[in-house]
Each structure stands twice: as structure tokens, then as C-alpha cells.
Image: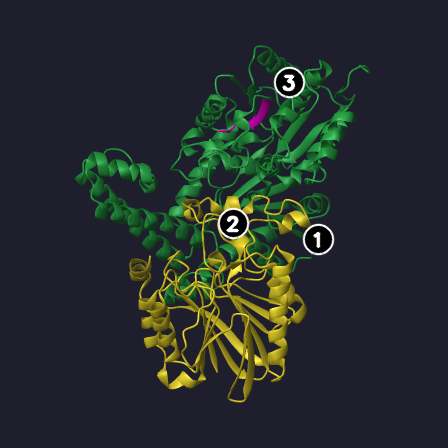
Chain colours: A yellow, B green
């Protein structure tokens, strides 16, 4: 079984079409698409439907959470397309049982103040944070009833502290000096002040959840600069899978993650980019830069 | 002496030139100047000068409360401890963790005790001032140590501007002393002085009789990796082609200027000017923007290849290109050569300071050397902005460590004298000014560069030669650094 995870597509239907066309249709029933949010950006319902149909037609099912640029209640009424936001889903392919649960949107403090995005949550308000945690816990309990071999958490936001480090999107980022900025006293002081670092954009509620409830696999996106990072903490494997779209960074776009699950407790994950790999370096630069 | 609130301890003997600079600072303030910039060589005791001036001002009741700003958190403790060893009566609060709850308490502490003020990082200053925890009325004097980056030209569009961290300080009427190393370019110092207006004064000179640190600048060690050359040549060629294309467009529209600094063309104001004055159409402006963005990306990519930034490369689309993919699977020749050199220096009982511009490269170096040379934990220390316990790590390295791998986080103020040591510059800093800050930390010893054969070799040979020349020349005017900065 292949789980193919994408994030931050930003409505790039053309690239997605090309990508899907390259997939082996014979493997369709053993393929599950996971979308970790920011599927569209000012897309209408029809355009969302077009994206989901594309993926649904070449897979067993599509599991998604909306990101901060998507509308909160993103539902397209397609049979094998499931919204995982504050929801759960269980699946069995080739005798391997998987339980999925998810959370869409992004913490308010992870986006720029001047951005008015439709799907954010303020986890600094205790009651809202508790609500998020409760929803995740209930959905975990639900999938545990099926005794899954793997518990897969899909969120748009990373957990706080894991592949969630970023800086504002400015010209500075692409200049040769950015590392100095990044390196300057990132953590001013221990404890509280470190937690207040503006460069950690992950969700503390999600962090708390993964710390105590330990899913096997956690897939997320949102923080573009950390796309392609993976990490293992305890028994949990974390993957920041963004970004599939060609923007905001040409160099790090076209990314996707493939998780091949062969046995009950054995899987192989690898990042890849949707590009023509056989091009010579020169031609590659010409085409993709 | 005992009637004075503060002053140098018996251990501290001020030198004549220091006292002379102190008098010049005090005279400047008496003459109505508000900002004094002191630019002297490393090792001239700029901090002592500032503290002597501070004590005089305190003892004359001109100053009751001082704010001292230090560029890095790691330096605050070291700074205060040293200052208190050298001077009595310096009750200083170290980088206080402020919260709204405690601010009145701290103000009270400052007011009703013998405390002279607060020492904090530039970053803390920015945060606390922005939150209105402090204002200029809380201090009679501000001392900014290691103020070389008071103005920065980080994104080349704006020219020099106030550092993000110290922005706002130029509006304060409080008296200020800025301490700068001598090697900061004149152009930059002029920009600083201009920001602080007419009430500023610059004291800049070479002190002749300072003890000199002996450096040996080795010829760069050249690494031959034909694959890297293929990548770099292709990037260079692309880079040149973009430059030619942009120049062609500029020539076509009769645009003069901008050619030395093409990045300026990304500035919306410049683009607007091209449109209005030279009649460049929107479509062509878009074309220029695309070209310049590529131009910047290429410079960036070249550095990733040359500076072993494999972590970033492996997360980019280039990792999928078959040649890059193959290269990423081979051993990094630059790292391999580094291990060889480090082993040799270790055998000769040297302490080794390895500088990398990138955090990810520093991490890679540390883990590579640890594995390759089978090092013990205490042998190798890494200090970047990402580690919490920078000061403890530095202290451990000074006492028992053999290799220190670090980044620009230690480029200012940290004192890392290596009795028998070598600074290995794995990736050069962004300018000669920064390079001088880096090598200045070790207070003498060998300096070694690593460079890939080809264009990097030429550059590093040039840099090594320039450092040799600069170190050899005593006169400040002959330093000849400006053209690199």
C-alpha cells in the first residue's frame, strides 16, 4: 500500500494533473492520497471538486485536512474523499489496518498579522486549545476500536518545535545573508522566552497531543521552509511534506512523500520531487529555476 | 577614591591612550554631543574606555542609570563578570527576564539600590522597548558594545539602514557610546554617524603600541572535485547569461546605472522609475523581476554546493536531478579533506576553531568529524544560535575541548584565545569585515582556508593574500579593506 502525501498545493491544478498522469493506474486501489492542507487559495467549490476528483480517480481514497488558506468546512461530497478535520477514518488494504485522524487550519500566531486567512485557531485561549485536544483524543479512541496497525495523524500545522522553524517571507530570505539572521540568538532565554520565539510556527496543542498519545506517523505541512524534513521522536515519525505548488519557493516546490507500507510494522518513507530527473544539470536549471 | 561610586579596581591600570579617549568622550558630551562612536583595534580595551567614561559620568552625577547593550546572549555574563572584576561599584542587572508583573520591581531596584543599570542583548532591547517596558527616560547613558552591525545593508536594496534590533535608538536623546572595531569600513561608519545626526562624533584611530597577535595565514587547501566544478560552472554560466540579458534590456531602454548591483532592480521604487522615466513596459518589468530572482537564487545555490550545505540541497528539487542525486550519495570531499587536516592538527596538539557560515553545515561538520575521527564528547563542541547552553559549551571548550565548530553566533566579542591554535574557515563569512571578526576571536595563531579548485580557489587565494597584507600593515589607512566590504 502506498500513502502519497502532499501539502500546500495552492490550487495548482495543472501541475497536479501532470503528476497524477504519471502514476501507475494499475496501483490505484492500493494508493491513498493524503492532503495536509492549503489545497486551494481563493478557489471556488467547483475548483476544489476538480482537484479532489483528479486524485480520487487515481486512488483508493483521498484523505485531507483544510489548511489556513482553505475554508474551514471544506466538503466536496465525493464518495471516496474524506475530510479528516476533527474527524477520523479507518481503512484496511492488503490486511493492513490504518487509523487516520486529523486537524485542519493553523494557529493564529503562525501567520502574519496582516494576513486574513479563513481557517485559523487561537490556541492561546485555553478553552479553544482544550477543544482541539478533546477532539483529537475522541477521534483517536474511535480509530483504536479497529485495532489499527498504524495510527496516522494528519494536520496542516506542524507540532510546536518539530520542522516548524521559519522566517517572514521577504527578499532577505533569498539573499546570501539569511543564515546570519537565522543564527542570531534564536533562543533568547530558556523556558518561557524560547517558547515565545516567533520563528517556531507549530501548534502547541498538537505538540501536546503527539507527546502523550504518540501516533505512529504524523504528516503535516504549513511551514514551507522546513518542507522535506523528517524526524523520529520515540515511536513517532514526523514528516513535513510541503510544498507541492511551484510557489512560494521554486527550489523547494513540487515535493511529495511516499510511504510504502508492506507489513504490519514495516514501512519505508521517501521524499521526492515531481520533476524530470533525467535532464542534465544545465537543462534542469533552465527548466525549473 | 572611596568617595566615588565606581572606578577601576587596583587590578585595572588604564593606559594613556585609553585615558585620552575617555577625555575625548567626556569633552564631546560636555560640548553637547549625544552620540560618540569609538572605533579602535581589537585588544585596545574599548570596553575599559567605555567603563572609565561611565564611572566619570557617574561620579560627577551626570549618570545614574546606564543601559548596556551587547550583541549576543552568550556574552552578557562574560561581559558583566569581567567588568565587575575590573571596576568596583558596577552593580549591573544581567539581561533581566522581564514581564509586565516585574517591571515596576525592576525599576524600583534600579532606583533604590546601588545598581547602575542593566546589561542586555540587542534583541532584548528591541523586544522590551517595543513593549514599552523601558523608554529613554529610564537611562542617562547607553553603551553599545560591539556595535559594528548598528547599521546593516543586509538586503542591498536599501543601502545601510538601522539594525532591526537597535532601531529606534537613533531617536533617543540620551547620551550614547558606541564601541566598534577598527576594521569596520569607513563607508559603514559614515552611515552610522549620519543616522545619529549632527550631535555625533567619531573617535577612530590606530593605537601604535598595542601588543600584536601573531597570525600565520596558510595558503588555501585546495580540493579537487570535478563534479562540483560542473555544477558551479553551469551556475556561473547561467548567472552570466542572466546578467547579459538584464544589461541588454537596460541598454535597449537607455537606462544608466544599476548594473553594478542588479538586485536593486527588484526594488518597486526602481521599477516604477524605469516605467515612468524610461518607458519600460509592464511585461518587460516582469521579465526583469524574474531574471533577477533567478540571479539571486543561483548565487544561493552556488554557495550550497561549495559550502557542503547538503541538508538544504537534499530538500530542494535539485536533489531529484540525476547528477546531483548521485553527488549527494558520494562522500563530501571538502569534509573529507577537513577531517584530514583536523587529524593532522590534533596530532600536533593544536586547538582547532572551525568556522562555518551556515548552521546546517556546522552541524554536518560536527557529526562528520565526530564519526570520522572517533572523537569523544569533550573533544568536539558545537556552538550555533540553536544551542541553549552556548556559554557553558564555550567554557568547556576553553578548558578541555580540542575542536570548536561554530557559526557567526560567536563572531562578536567572545574571547577564544587558543594558545596554540588554528582557525579553519570552512565557509567564509559574507565580507572581509566579518572575516576579521571571526579570526579576531582567536587572538593569534594559524588561519587556514578550504577551497574547491576553480573559482573558489581564486577567491580564497585572494582573501588569504588580503588578510596577510592587512595583518602586516600597521597603518589603518593602509588596511585596504573597504573594497571588500
Provide residue A75's location: percent of width, then percent of height. Answer: 43, 72
State the CA–CA distance, disc 1 to disc 3: 39 Å
Q: State whether the magenta stretch is mostly helix, strand or loop.
A: strand
Nearer-N-terminus badge (1/2): 2
Secondary element at image label 3: helix
How packed is label 3: few (under 14 Cα within 10 Å), some, or many (20 or more)? many
Which chain does the numbered disc 2 sit on? B
Secondary element at image label 2: loop
State the CA–CA distance, disc 2 to disc 3: 37 Å
Nearer-N-terminus badge (2/3): 3
Q: Quadrant of residue B131?
A: top right
Report whether residue B348 is seen.
Answer: no
Q: Mark 3 highlights which residue?
A: B18
Q: Residue B237's mark?
A: none
Magenta residues (range) = B176-184
Q: Residue furthest right?
A: B2
Quadrant showing the N terminus of chain B: top right
Between B462 and B137, the one lying in front of the other is B137
Cβ atoms at labels 2 and 3 below 8 Å apart: no
Q: Quadrant of residue B269?
A: top left
Q: Mark 2 highlights which residue?
A: B358
Q: Mark 1 highlights which residue?
A: B378
Amino acid at each position: 500500500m502506498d500513502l502519497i502525501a502532499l501539502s500546500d498545493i495552492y490550487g495548482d491544478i495543472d501541475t497536479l494533473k501532470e503528476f497524477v498522469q504519471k502514476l501507475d493506474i494499475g496501483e490505484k486501489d492500493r494508493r491513498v492520497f493524503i492532503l495536509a492542507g492549503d489545497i486551494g487559495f481563493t478557489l471556488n467549490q467547483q475548483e476544489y471538486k476538480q482537484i479532489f476528483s483528479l486524485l480520487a480517480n487515481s486512488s483508493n481514497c483521498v484523505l485531507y485536512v483544510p489548511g489556513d488558506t482553505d475554508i474551514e468546512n471544506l466538503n466536496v461530497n465525493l464518495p471516496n474523499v474524506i475530510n479528516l478535520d476533527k474527524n477520523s477514518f479507518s481503512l484496511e488494504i492488503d490486511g493492513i489496518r490504518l487509523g487516520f485522524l486529523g486537524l485542519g487550519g493553523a494557529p493564529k500566531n503562525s501567520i502574519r498579522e496582516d494576513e486574513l486567512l479563513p481557517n485559523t485557531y487561537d490556541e492561546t485561549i485555553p478553552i479553544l486549545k482544550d477543544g482541539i485536544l478533546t477532539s483529537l483524543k475522541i477521534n483517536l479512541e474511535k480509530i483504536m476500536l479497529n485495532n489499527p496497525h498504524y495510527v496516522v495523524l494528519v494536520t496542516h500545522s506542524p507540532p510546536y518545535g518539530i520542522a516548524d522553524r521559519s522566517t517572514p517571507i521577504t527578499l532577505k530570505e533569498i539573499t546570501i545573508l539569511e543564515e546570519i539572521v537565522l543564527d542570531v540568538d534564536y533562543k533568547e532565554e530558556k523556558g518561557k522566552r524560547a517558547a515565545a520565539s516567533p520563528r517556531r510556527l507549530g501548534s502547541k496543542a498538537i505538540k501536546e497531543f503527539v507527546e502523550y498519545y504518540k501516533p505512529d506517523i504524523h504528516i503535516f505541512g504549513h511551514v514551507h521552509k522546513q518542507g522535506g524534513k523528517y524526524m523520529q521522536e520515540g515511536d513517532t515519525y514526523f514528516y513535513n511534506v510541503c510544498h507541492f505548488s511551484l510557489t512560494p519557493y521554486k527550489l523547494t516546490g513540487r515535493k511529495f512523500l511516499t510511504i510504502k507500507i508492506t507489513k504490519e510494522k514495516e514501512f519505508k518513507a521517501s521524499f521526492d520531487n515531481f520533476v524530470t530527473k533525467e535532464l542534465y544539470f544545465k537543462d534542469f536549471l533552465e527548466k525549473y529555476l | 577614591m572611596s568617595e566615588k561610586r565606581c572606578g577601576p579596581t587596583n587590578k585595572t591600570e588604564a593606559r594613556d591612550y585609553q585615558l585620552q579617549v575617555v577625555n575625548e568622550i567626556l569633552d564631546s558630551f560636555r560640548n553637547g554631543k549625544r552620540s560618540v562612536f569609538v572605533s579602535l583595534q581589537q585588544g585596545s580595551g574599548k570596553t575599559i574606555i567605555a567603563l572609565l567614561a561611565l564611572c566619570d559620568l557617574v561620579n560627577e552625577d551626570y549618570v545614574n542609570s546606564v543601559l548596556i547593550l551587547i550583541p549576543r546572549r552568550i556574552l552578557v555574563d562574560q561581559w558583566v563578570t569581567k567588568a565587575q572584576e575590573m571596576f568596583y561599584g558596577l552593580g549591573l542587572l544581567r539581561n533581566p527576564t522581564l514581564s509586565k508583573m516585574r517591571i515596576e520591581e525592576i525599576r524600583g531596584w534600579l532606583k533604590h539600590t546601588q545598581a547602575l543599570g542593566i546589561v542586555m542583548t540587542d534583541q532584548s532591547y528591541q523586544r522590551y522597548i517595543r513593549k514599552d517596558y523601558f523608554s529613554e527616560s529610564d537611562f542617562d547613558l547607553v553603551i553599545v558594545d560591539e556595535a559594528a552591525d548598528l547599521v546593516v545593508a543586509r538586503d542591498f536594496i536599501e543601502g545601510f539602514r538601522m539594525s532591526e534590533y537597535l532601531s529606534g535608538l537613533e531617536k533617543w536623546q540620551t547620551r550614547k557610546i558606541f564601541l566598534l572595531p577598527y576594521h569596520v569600513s569607513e563607508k559603514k561608519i559614515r552611515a552610522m554617524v549620519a543616522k545619529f545626526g549632527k550631535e555625533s562624533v567619531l573617535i577612530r584611530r590606530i593605537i601604535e603600541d598595542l601588543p600584536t597577535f601573531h597570525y600565520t595565514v596558510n595558503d588555501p587547501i585546495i580540493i579537487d572535485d570535478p563534479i562540483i566544478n560542473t555544477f558551479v560552472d553551469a551556475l556561473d554560466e547561467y548567472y552570466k547569461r542572466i546578467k547579459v540579458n538584464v544589461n541588454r534590456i537596460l541598454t535597449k531602454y537607455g537606462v544608466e546605472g544599476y548594473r553594478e548591483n542588479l538586485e536593486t532592480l527588484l526594488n518597486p521604487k526602481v521599477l516604477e522609475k524605469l516605467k515612468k522615466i524610461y518607458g519600460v513596459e509592464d511585461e518587460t518589468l516582469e521579465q526583469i523581476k524574474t531574471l533577477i530572482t533567478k540571479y539571486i537564487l543561483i548565487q544561493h545555490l552556488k554557495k550550497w554546493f561549495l559550502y557542503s550545505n547538503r541538508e538544504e540541497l537534499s530538500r530542494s528539487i535539485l536533489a531529484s536531478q540525476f547528477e546531483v542525486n548521485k553527488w549527494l550519495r558520494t562522500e563530501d570531499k571538502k569534509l573529507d579533506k577537513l577531517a584530514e587536516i583536523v587529524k593532522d592538527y590534533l596530532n600536533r596538539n593544536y586547538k582547532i576553531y572551525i568556522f562555518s557560515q551556515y548552521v546546517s553545515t556546522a552541524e554536518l561538520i560536527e557529526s562528520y568529524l565526530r564519526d570520522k575521527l572517533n572523537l569523544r564528547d569533550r573533544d568536539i563542541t558545537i556552538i550555533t544560535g540553536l544551542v541553549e547552553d552556548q556559554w557553558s559549551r564555550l567554557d568547556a571548550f576553553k578548558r578541555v575541548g580540542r575542536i570548536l565548530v561554530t557559526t557567526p553566533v560567536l563572531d562578536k566579542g567572545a574571547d577564544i584565545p587558543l594558545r596554540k591554535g588554528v582557525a579553519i574557515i570552512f565557509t567564509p563569512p559574507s565580507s572581509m569585515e566579518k572575516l576579521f571578526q571571526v579570526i579576531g576571536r582567536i587572538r593569534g595563531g594559524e588561519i587556514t582556508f578550504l577551497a574547491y579548485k576553480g573559482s573558489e580557489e581564486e577567491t580564497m587565494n585572494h582573501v588569504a593574500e588580503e588578510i596577510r597584507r592587512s595583518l602586516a600593515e600597521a597603518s589603518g589607512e593602509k588596511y585596504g579593506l573597504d573594497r571588500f566590504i
